């Protein structure tokens, strides 16, 4: 049984940053991921990373923008930590090799981004996530003697000791099918969000909420799960992401009258209002018949107003995406977009060091909810979130390891997981296919738990999700093998997704107001008196979600009306 | 919706059976990707079809395969295009080459690709002292290395690298492109050491045969071969590294022979590559040793009339007027203040090539007998065509 001071599950930005930080603090570290680390979904983050590094900028302004962007649901102590540590983190990335683009003086160039009062976003063309992820992986290769990498291992459960403390995890080597217990003093979940609950989504196929569901299963509370971000510019065709950097560089949004409709919704920030505001504006235009395209379900993003040379050097990836996936040359004609599911603001509830209420269990990145994003995440704050809280989790877990012995991880959990996988593989042919259930879940969430929501739709969604949970427990698979049995992993992932979806819908029904990404047409106003609080969801004895709430931390910014 | 038929290469390592082909017919719009077709087949008919995939948008690099024999990302290949280029109307998908197959379309990247990446010391060795804020470096340098940073490590170039097929130890296109990312980065402290290492390695930069397969294969425009050529120019021309593999001498001999004769003189190329760039090179011991060991190959070439004894003694040479044209090319290229590097992030050049308004490079070398366009083209001198 492998044993480490710190076991990290997930190897995107949060996981890799945690691993490097823990190793630097001289802990023994293992990082385990169901895909090769550079395939992690952080790779798709395009636009950049926010940090108040400009001479005329200050981290408190960044923090205020983030608080306002969150619709005052973000915890201000956590936001202060994230924003004040951002400049140092950005410089650290620069020093280890991230090729941030420069201005004419050779210093870091910054681009404008949504919801920000200043240019504050450092970037590498429009492949910022990819560049940072690959550079962190370079560092993991460099420190291969101090960080053990388990690439293409799929975690199936967290293991608790007799005191209910996290003592490791069970995982399956995807290549051989071998299952093993990884014993650890602390486990850091860094396995990303659950965007695959939606269809379409900008998220990769691997974003199935594994860590959120595993933590929930282990007794950790989930927080802000109702807050699901719809990105304003996803390709109408198939939901692929078009970076906010496009609007940051000056691109316009146009309706069927070829008018910049954002002047009606956010006259001062226009296209660069926060994402919830822009997505809602687009959806309103579409609903009121001013959408574009054959079914009127799209909006035009006009990049042709950005100088062509600038587009080619700094928005190249979306030039490729336009050409390859929509047949559009974005330097010459507008491209059709619409709001699409993009990010889960909620997740496993943690403190500012990534600790969950389950001792020894940490979470960082999209899997976690600190909460720095509250009701709505600002663009280019997610990379920052993963790095700051990934690092803090790694450091804290390493320090914790110094003062404790290796906990006992009972083998019973391993046996249960081995049996569970065997039982899935052994299911009779009958019932529905995994893929059908997944498609129905995606369509349901995208219809009822989207930009606009109401009681009736949400109730219907909950009914469907619960029916799908029943159906999934008997869904059969085709692959009976052990080597790269992706089919059986798909069945397990479907279970995780349904757990996440249930928590999201339950929380969305509970919050009877409109705040950030949650817009209830039956409760269209923000209601600070009753709802300036987090909704926490915990798994009850009988497996059903239990609802409670917790206060929002306010340090220096009292809630006020949000205008862009 | 249209129907497309896929022919997938299947292999189950647990069955003991040999790999086989399997066909599935799917319903999708023609501009959807081959990956979506495979996923539909997996969802509807057979959940055991093995393929790595995640983002579906050509950014994670998981789904490298061969479609109709050519390497690409499955998510980056449109069904209509794939159908058009298929042999018999059925889109053939098989695993990438040069790497062991684990199952179906899944290959062992670790055993080949990642091992090679680790060979090039793939991390920044930062110049000291590390500044408090960012390193101040020219704007262009960071845009320049973005081309190799854009590599998503999908392995498509490794799959079809001909040099690697012959020499499995060849460091290869992806890893060498990764090496350029550091050599081109002004913050790195070990440019010379890196270049010397890659030049002296018998499986290093001079092991590439300029076949362009990696440029064709790359879905992200990284142009690995171009990065390898840039490493060579930096090593040979800028750092004066003369390697024990005779790679730098070989290039020098090539350049000076074409300058002199307008054509390659094979009889001189070999001795000069080993003995240095001089007509006397053949009398140097290092060249003579190589000449002696190459006698069987020379004999075969004579037998098969690839060379004649006369040509060995008296090299062919272009007519004077043509030779003048060649000289002008040299003058133009060498007369530039800065070396021209074709980096689309800076020039936007590849887009222009695809655009409606003329393709400068392509038309002046067009081998289809069409006259070059009338208006001025880079590299074309007025008054007489350099083409033969």
Image (cartoon, rainbow, N blue to C red):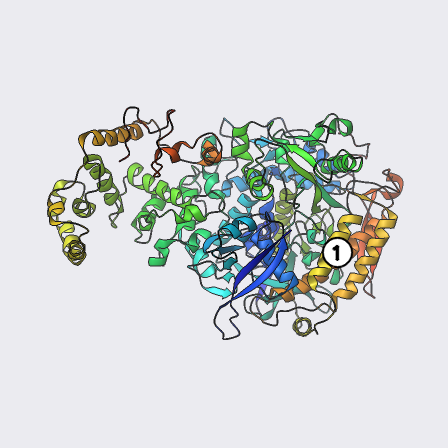
Residue B58: x and y in percent read 55, 48
Residue A406 shows in the view:
no
Quadrant occupied by the N terminus of chain A: bottom right
Residue A93, above or below A195: above
Q: Using the rendered view, name the quadrant where residue A434 is placed.
A: bottom right
The image quarter containing residue A172 is bottom right
* Residue A117 horizontal/vertical position (percent): 68, 29
Q: Residue at x 47, y 29 (%)?
A: B357
Name the quadrant containing residue A340: top right
Query: Which of A222 and A236 lies nearest the eye of the viewer?
Result: A236
Crowdedness of circle 1 by 10 Å Cα count: few (<14), some, many (20+)?
A: many
Could you tell me how many numbered marks the image carries? 1
Residue B20 visible in the current orientation: yes
Closest to the observer, B314 or A8: B314
Q: Quadrant of the C terminus of chain A?
A: top right
Which secondary structure, mark 1? Answer: helix
x%, y% of residue B208?
Answer: 33, 49
Above or below A79: residue A502: below
Task: Give above or below for B4 relative to B372.
Answer: below
Q: Which chain's residue wears label 1?
A: A
Left or right position of A470 against B75: right
Position of residue A65 measured from the top left corner of the image (x, y, whole percent): 71, 34
Q: Which residue is mark 1?
A: A441
């Amino acid at each position: 049984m492998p044993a480490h001071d710190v076991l990290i599950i997930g190897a995107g930005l949060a996981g890799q940053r945690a691993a490097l930080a823990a190793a630097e603090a001289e802990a023994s570290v293992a990082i385990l991921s169901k895909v090769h680390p550079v395939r992690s979904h952080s790779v798709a983050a395009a636009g950049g990373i926010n940090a108040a590094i400009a001479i005329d900028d200050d981290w408190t302004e960044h923090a205020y923008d983030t608080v306002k962007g969150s619709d005052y649901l973000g915890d201000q102590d956590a936001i202060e930590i994230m924003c004040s540590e951002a400049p140092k983190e950005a410089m650290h990335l620069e020093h280890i090799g991230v090729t941030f683009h420069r201005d004419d003086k050779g210093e870091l160039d910054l681009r404008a981004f949504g919801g920000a009062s200043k240019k504050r976003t450092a970037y590498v063309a429009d492949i910022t996530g990819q560049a940072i992820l690959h550079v962190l992986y370079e560092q993991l290769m460099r420190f291969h003697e101090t960080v053990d990498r388990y690439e293409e291992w799929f975690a199936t459960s967290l293991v608790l000791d007799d005191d209910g403390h996290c003592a490791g995890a069970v995982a399956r080597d995807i290549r051989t099918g071998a299952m093993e217990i990884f014993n650890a003093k602390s486990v850091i979940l860094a396995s990303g969000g659950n965007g695959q609950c939606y269809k379409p989504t900008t998220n990769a196929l691997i974003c199935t909420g594994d860590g959120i569901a595993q933590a929930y299963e282990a007794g950790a509370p989930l927080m802000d799960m109702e807050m699901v971000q719809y990105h304003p510019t996803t390709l109408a065709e198939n939901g692929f992401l078009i970076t906010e950097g496009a609007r940051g560089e000056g691109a316009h949004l146009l309706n069927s009258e070829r008018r910049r409709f954002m002047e009606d919704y956010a006259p001062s920030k226009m296209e660069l209002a926060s994402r919830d505001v822009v997505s809602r504006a687009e959806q309103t235009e579409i609903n009121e018949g001013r959408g574009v395209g054959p079914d009127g379900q799209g909006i035009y993003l006009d990049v042709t107003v950005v100088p062509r040379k600038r587009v080619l050097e700094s928005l190249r990836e979306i030039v490729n995406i336009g050409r390859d996936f929509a047949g559009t040359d974005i330097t010459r004609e507008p491209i059709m977009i619409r709001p699409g599911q993009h990010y889960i603001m909620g997740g496993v509830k943690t403190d500012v060091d990534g600790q969950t209420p389950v001792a020894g269990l940490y979470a960082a990145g999209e899997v976690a909810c600190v909460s720095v994003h509250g009701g709505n995440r600002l663009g280019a704050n997610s990379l920052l979130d993963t790095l700051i809280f990934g690092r803090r989790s790694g450091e804290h877990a390493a320090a914790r390891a110094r003062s404790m012995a290796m906990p006992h991880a009972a083998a019973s959990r391993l046996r249960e997981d081995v049996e569970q996988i065997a039982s899935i593989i052994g299911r009779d042919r009958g019932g529905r296919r995994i893929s059908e259930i997944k498609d129905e879940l995606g369509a349901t969430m995208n219809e009822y738990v989207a930009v606009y929501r109401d009681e009736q739709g949400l109730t219907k969604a909950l009914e469907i999700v619960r029916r799908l949970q029943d159906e999934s427990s008997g869904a059969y698979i085709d692959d009976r093998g052990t080597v790269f049995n992706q089919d059986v992993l798909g069945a397990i992932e479907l279970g995780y997704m349904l757990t996440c979806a249930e928590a999201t819908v339950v929380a969305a029904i509970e919050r009877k107001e409109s705040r950030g990404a949650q817009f209830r047409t039956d409760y269209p106003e923000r209601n600070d008196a009753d709802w300036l609080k987090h909704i926490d969801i915990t798994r009850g004895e009988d497996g059903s979600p239990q609802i409670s709430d917790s206060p929002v931390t306010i340090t220096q910014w009292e809630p006020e009306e949000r205008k862009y | 919706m249209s129907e497309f038929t896929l022919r997938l290469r299947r292999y189950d390592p647990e069955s003991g059976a040999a790999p086989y082909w399997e066909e599935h017919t799917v319903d999708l719009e023609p501009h959807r990707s081959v990956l979506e077709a495979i996923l539909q087949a997996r969802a509807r008919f057979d959940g055991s079809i093995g393929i790595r995939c995640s983002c579906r948008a050509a950014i994670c690099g998981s789904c490298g395969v061969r479609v109709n024999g050519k390497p690409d990302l499955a998510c980056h290949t449109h069904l209509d295009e794939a159908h058009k280029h298929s042999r018999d109307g059925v889109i053939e998908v098989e695993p990438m080459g040069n790497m062991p197959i684990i199952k179906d379309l899944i290959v062992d990247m670790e055993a080949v690709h990642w091992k090679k990446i680790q060979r090039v010391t793939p991390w920044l060795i930062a110049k000291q002292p590390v500044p408090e804020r960012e390193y101040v470096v020219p704007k262009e340098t960071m845009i320049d290395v973005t081309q190799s940073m854009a590599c998503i490590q999908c392995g498509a170039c490794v799959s079809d690298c001909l040099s690697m097929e012959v020499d499995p130890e060849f460091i290869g296109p992806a890893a060498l492109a990764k090496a350029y990312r550091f050599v081109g980065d002004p913050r790195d402290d070990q440019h010379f050491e890196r270049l010397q290492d890659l030049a002296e390695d018998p499986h290093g930069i001079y092991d590439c045969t300029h076949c362009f397969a990696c440029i064709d294969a790359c879905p992200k425009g990284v142009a690995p071969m171009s990065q390898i050529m840039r490493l060579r120019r930096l090593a040979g021309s800028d750092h004066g590294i003369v390697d024990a593999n005779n790679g730098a001498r070989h290039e020098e001999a090539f350049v000076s022979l074409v300058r002199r004769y307008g054509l390659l003189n094979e009889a001189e190329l070999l001795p000069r590559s080993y003995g240095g760039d001089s007509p006397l090179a053949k009398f140097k011991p290092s060249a003579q040793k190589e000449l002696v060991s190459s006698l069987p190959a020379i004999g075969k070439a004579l037998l098969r009339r690839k060379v004649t004894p006369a040509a060995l003694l008296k090299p062919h040479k272009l007519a004077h007027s043509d030779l003048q044209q060649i000289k002008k090319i040299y003058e133009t290229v060498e007369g530039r203040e800065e070396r021209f590097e074709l980096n689309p992030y800076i020039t936007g050049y590849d887009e222009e090539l695809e655009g409606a308004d003329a393709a400068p490079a392509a038309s002046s070398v067009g081998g289809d007998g069409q006259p070059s366009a009338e208006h001025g083209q880079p590299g074309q001198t007025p008054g007489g065509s350099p083409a033969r």
